[in-house]
Amino acid sequence: MSRSSLRRGALLATALTVALTTAACTGDAEPDPQPTRSPSASPSGKPTEKPREVTFGAFGTEEEVAAFQSVVDSFNASSTTRRVTLQSWPDHESALEDVLAGNAPDAFLTSRIDLDQLVDAEALQPVSLLLDERGVDFGDRFSRDAVDAFAMDDELQCMAYSVSPMVVYYNTDIVDFDKMERRDYDVPTANDEGVRERWTLAEFGAAAQFASRRGDRRGVWIDPTLQGLAPFIYSGGGQVFDDDDAPTSLAFSDDSTREALSETLAILRNATLTPTNAQLARATPVQLFKRGELAMVAGFRNLVPELREAEDLDFDVLPMPVIDDRATVGDISGLCISADSEVTGDAADFIAYAVSDSAMSTVATTGYIVPANTSVAASPQFLAPYDEPANAAAFNSSIRYMVVPPFIDQREELVEAVTPLLEQLVTAPGVLDLETTTEQIDEVSRTILSPEETEETESPEPTESPSE
């Protein structure tokens, strides 16, 4: 077994041990799931009733689900009046489908991008008062941005659980900033502790150029998607959507957006810096990165465990590069209570425990999430000072610069419709007509986001000419 596999197994074993031994010893602000009655008998001396059943649903990888099971086990170990059973899904789409179909667990994990559909379906029981009664501190102990993301209709609909901002992963053997500096490349400035906390688009481009100077190795890959391009657009003062609340179109043809794209595409369209079609045909960008054939790739926190397992890979992270202002995107997950739950109080007790320091530390040690609990996010369980990435604090510092996207019911349809044009924008060979392509992107987006307006303004289709 490899050292990395042994390390991961040790982490999970440690996480389970910590959870089981600290379940009844949470911090001052953490709820105490201890029963109020004797575990063996009621006040009348009769045997206690069967524990109340509570279901909890979570989605994620096998390791993430295993960590959630550890949290469930530690909660159950400290209570005889209720018993939590874990239900799992592979992703948030599957979870949303089950909940909207009326099969919601009492408490469940959800993605913030699904919140509007859950609220519209009246599938949630707001958690504000329930968690306040259980001593959950919504102040400095939790990321304000993450908590606010789950506020709707003057209620906290779900409790913020984790945040995952997009950052840049880089191979530290290939992108050697000290060597770059000696060779007069632009490099990000290190602080007094030697940490490079931010970098400009020019420094990002210089790193890609430095990494691509030998052989077939390439400097950078950014997915040609709305999510991949959004941080650059926002950083350059542009907008992805024409309205932050009720978008009717993308805003790629906006002058500020075009200017930000023009600067960004000067790097992303450079064939000497990005993977060739042949490279992408035989491997994904992440696979190329793990093999040392690609120096930088943008991604989220869930990449960390996979990269830690890669042989001969040394990596670190930096925030997304800056054009004018810092900006990034990402996802936020929260813990919700079903409107149909018959054990609302017990479900609230479990959520209050699940966001406590001890319980969140259990999940944080897997490396997959950035805890919304700021105490755990600043702890060794998350920062892992003896493991990669060394600059894990970059995830925490990036949260405040996350741009939360508007709710879009037709999100999948929009992505499917505009992705071919975005790929053309980023990867098509030859000279790019930025003005025409961005206008086409916006026009196609309107057919999804405002189809009624599009139909009203559409002119009759021309008849085909003989040449067509």
Image (spheres, helix red, strand yellow):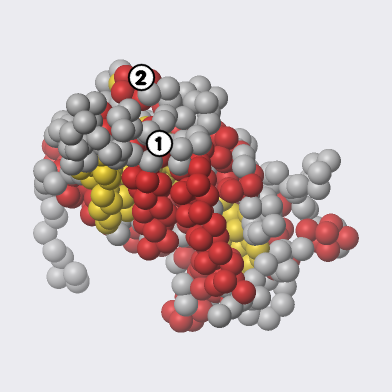
Element type where label 2 sits in the image: helix
Identified at 60% across, 58% down, the residue is 169
* Amino acid type, label 1: Tyr
Outermost residue toward the front? 45
Q: Earlier in the sequence, mark 1 or mark 2?
A: 2
| Nearer to us in this view, 424 or 306 | 306
Picture coordinates of residue 250, whole percent (x, y) = 35, 41
The residue that mark 2 highlights is 133
* Amino acid type, label 2: Glu
Q: CA distance from mark 1 to mark 2?
A: 13 Å
Picture coordinates of residue 121, whole percent (x, y) = 15, 34
Picture coordinates of residue 25, whole percent (x, y) = 50, 36
Identified at 81% across, 44% down, the residue is 193
| 65 displayed left or right of 358 | left
Identified at 55% across, 72% down, the residue is 5
Instruction: Choose top left, top right, bottom left or bottom right for residue 66.
Output: bottom left
Element type where label 1 sits in the image: helix
The residue that mark 1 highlights is 353
Q: In the figure, 461 relative to 393: above or below?
A: below
Q: Quadrant of the C terminus?
A: bottom left
Q: Quadrant of the N terminus?
A: bottom right
| Nearer to us in this view, 98 or 129 | 129
